[in-house]
Image (tube, helix red, strand yellow):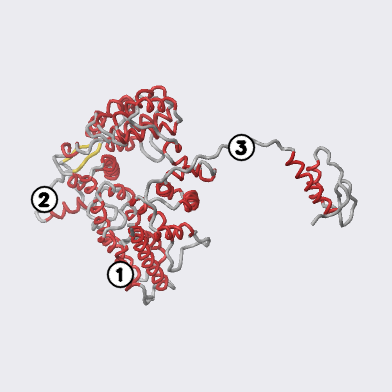
């Protein structure tokens, strides 16, 4: 239907801006050109805006058509089974609750199951449904912990989409070389050209890929431009040598000890100390040996430490005071230039003494194999059990812990961890639970799980949260049973239930789904002891119900992924 209104004069330059101003002020304060105040003024304004819109569009020169995007690359992986695809849609649709505080209710937390689902799908080599890629990238955008698994599952089409949507550019940054295609590693000329002319991210990706395939070729490629690289780039490139580190890398790393950058020197020294047969390790071992010795003349006081007390009790019956071998420490009195060249940092952090700081670095970088020879042929367990004079035990054992982790020495790790049932939750050598978690990382998965299970049986769950985090998922049966038994004990004791929410959340993600049947007896609301927290029984029942529901959901997820 056409409107009739007063004629509109041909707009002058800036007519559109004038119409916008009129609309903002209102036609009762300012009327369109050629129209007086009144009820027709708004209609005239709209008509004038319509005419000006057509005029503006008609005056535009046609732009050259944009180049059509290349088709998305093919994904050769098999598609998800239909049931698994439906499950993925549910997991991606779930969003964390907006309410604060601890999560309540018996429904599983689907956002915490998504990483596990992605890992399982990647292990089976499935490709995602194309229509779910936007939701998958949106989920990865909001959770950095989700990105590695999500981008692996999304496959090559994720990079194709990321180039079209700025919100997903993180996928390009996360991909090797910023999403750029690397040349075939067998094409030597293409590899050299990219190394000489590529962007920094491309060069890092190239070096990492080549290092994984041919460590020597990657090292030789790095050597061709090493002297001309920036210090921060040299540090990143040097870090790539951790992959496939071997004795053949020693000459290159020895040269890096003379680098202009202190950070590069420190990284080179760390890598060399991880090679127990290197010349640097031998030099650091000689320095550390000069600081540590056995003293056979000291008579321990029964109150000094556990080892001394045992020795005193053993000799009390004979009435004789027998000297117990004791480790004595004489820390370095200076940090000379040779020590600094080998990676010893001269200036200690705030609150640390210079001599203990230097001593710890020497012991940490020394090969662990020297200590048996230096300390009377004793085994690592026997060495750790020796008393240490003058309050040096903490410093010495902490340095041995760092050395065991760096050198991946399982025997020393076992000695420093001690027995999981030992009364001292801190262990004979570890200075903290964080140190124990690192030591456990040097053991195989089964031994790690067994040790943590024994620790929980003795010390409960409050001390074990960090240790659970290093155990393989799903938890081995002994560890799963130990966690469930400890939770049951806490429940029956009327313990404050919210303090176990972290462990309960770990159990939901890590407990073997086959354990769900053992938990049915814990679903009822227990009788609350007199000293229990108000409402604790209901919370425990609710938490166990959520745990059982989550375990059964995880079992269903696995079955869906295994369906042909």
- Tell whether 28 sits left or right of 73: right
Residue 429 higher or lower than 339, as above or below: below
Task: Kindly check if marks 2 and 1 are in contact, taking CB atoms under 8 A apart as contact.
Answer: no
Measured Cα–Cα span from mark 2 to mark 1: 60 Å
- Asked whether residue 346 appears in the rendered view, the answer is no
Number of the label disc, if any, that sits on residue 320: 2
Residue 111 versus residue 303: which sits nearer the camera?
111
Tell me which label, 3 or 2, sits earlier in the chain: 3
- Asked whether residue 99 appears in the rendered view, the answer is yes
Would you call the spot at circle 3 few (<14 residues within 10 Å), some (14-19), or many (20 or more)?
few
Give the x, y percent position of residue 428: 25, 50
Residue 369 versus residue 470: which sits nearer the camera?
470
Give the x, y percent position of residue 499: 40, 63
Report the residue at 19% width, 38% height from top: 369
Measured Cα–Cα span from mark 3 to mark 1: 64 Å
Q: Quadrant of the N terminus?
A: bottom right
- Tell whether 450 sits left or right of 311: right
Task: Kindly check if marks 3 and 1 are in contact, taking CB atoms under 8 A apart as contact.
Answer: no
Number of the label disc, if any, that sits on residue 517: 1
Of badges 3 and 1, the one in the foreground is 3
Element assignment for label 2: loop
Number of the label disc, if any, that sits on residue 36: none
Would you call the spot at circle 1 few (<14 residues within 10 Å), some (14-19), or many (20 or more)?
few
């Amino acid at each position: 239907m056409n409107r009739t209104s007063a004629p509109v004069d041909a707009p002058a330059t800036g007519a559109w801006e004038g119409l916008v101003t009129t609309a903002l002020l209102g036609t009762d304060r300012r009327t369109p050109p050629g129209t007086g105040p009144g009820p027709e003024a708004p209609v005239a304004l709209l008509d004038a805006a319509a005419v000006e819109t057509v005029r503006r569009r008609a005056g535009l020169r046609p732009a050259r058509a944009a180049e059509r995007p290349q088709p998305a690359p093919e994904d050769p992986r098999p598609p998800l089974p239909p049931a698994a695809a439906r499950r993925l849609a549910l997991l991606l649709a779930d969003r964390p609750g907006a309410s604060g505080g601890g999560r309540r209710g018996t429904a599983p937390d689907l956002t915490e199951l998504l990483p596990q689902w992605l890992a399982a799908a990647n292990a089976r080599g499935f490709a995602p449904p194309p229509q779910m890629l936007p939701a998958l990238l949106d989920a990865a955008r909001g959770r950095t912990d989700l990105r590695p698994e999500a981008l692996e599952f999304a496959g090559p089409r994720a990079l194709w989409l990321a180039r079209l949507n700025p919100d997903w550019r993180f996928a390009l940054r996360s991909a090797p070389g910023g999403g750029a295609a690397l040349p075939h590693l067998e094409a030597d000329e293409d590899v050299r050209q990219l190394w000489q002319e590529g962007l920094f991210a491309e060069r890092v990706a190239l070096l990492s890929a080549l290092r994984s395939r041919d460590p020597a070729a990657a090292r030789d490629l790095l050597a061709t431009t090493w002297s001309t690289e920036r210090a921060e780039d040299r540090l990143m490139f040097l870090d790539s040598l951790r992959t496939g580190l071997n004795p053949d890398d020693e000459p290159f790393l020895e040269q890096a000890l003379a680098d202009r950058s202190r950070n590069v020197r420190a990284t080179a020294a760390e890598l060399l100390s991880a090679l127990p047969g290197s010349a640097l390790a031998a030099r650091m071992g000689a320095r550390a040996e000069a600081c540590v010795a056995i003293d056979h003349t000291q008579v321990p006081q029964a109150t000094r430490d556990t080892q001394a007390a045992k020795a005193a009790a053993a000799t009390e019956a004979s009435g004789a005071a027998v000297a117990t071998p004791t480790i004595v420490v004489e820390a370095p009195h200076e940090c000379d230039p040779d020590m600094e060249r080998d990676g010893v940092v001269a200036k200690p952090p705030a609150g640390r003494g210079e001599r203990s700081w230097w001593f710890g670095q020497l012991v940490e970088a020394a090969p662990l194999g020297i200590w048996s020879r230096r300390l009377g042929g004793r085994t690592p367990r026997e060495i750790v059990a020796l008393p240490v004079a003058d309050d040096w035990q903490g410093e010495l054992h902490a340095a041995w812990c760092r050395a065991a982790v760096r050198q991946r020495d399982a025997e020393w790790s076992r000695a420093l961890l001690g027995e999981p049932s030992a009364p001292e939750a801190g262990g004979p050598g570890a200075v903290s639970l964080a140190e124990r978690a690192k030591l456990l990382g040097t053991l195989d998965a089964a031994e790690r799980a067994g040790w943590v299970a024994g620790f929980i049986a003795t010390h409960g769950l409050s001390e074990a949260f960090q240790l659970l985090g290093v155990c393989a998922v799903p938890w081995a049966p002994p560890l799963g049973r130990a966690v469930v038994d400890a939770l049951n004990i806490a429940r029956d004791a009327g313990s404050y239930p919210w303090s176990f929410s972290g462990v309960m959340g770990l159990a939901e993600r890590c407990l073997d789904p086959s354990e769900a049947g053992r938990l049915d007896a814990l679903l009822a609301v227990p009788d609350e002891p007199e000293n229990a927290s108000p409402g604790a029984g209901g919370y425990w029942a609710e938490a166990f119900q959520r745990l059982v529901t989550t375990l059964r959901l995880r079992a269903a997820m696995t079955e869906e992924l295994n369906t042909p």
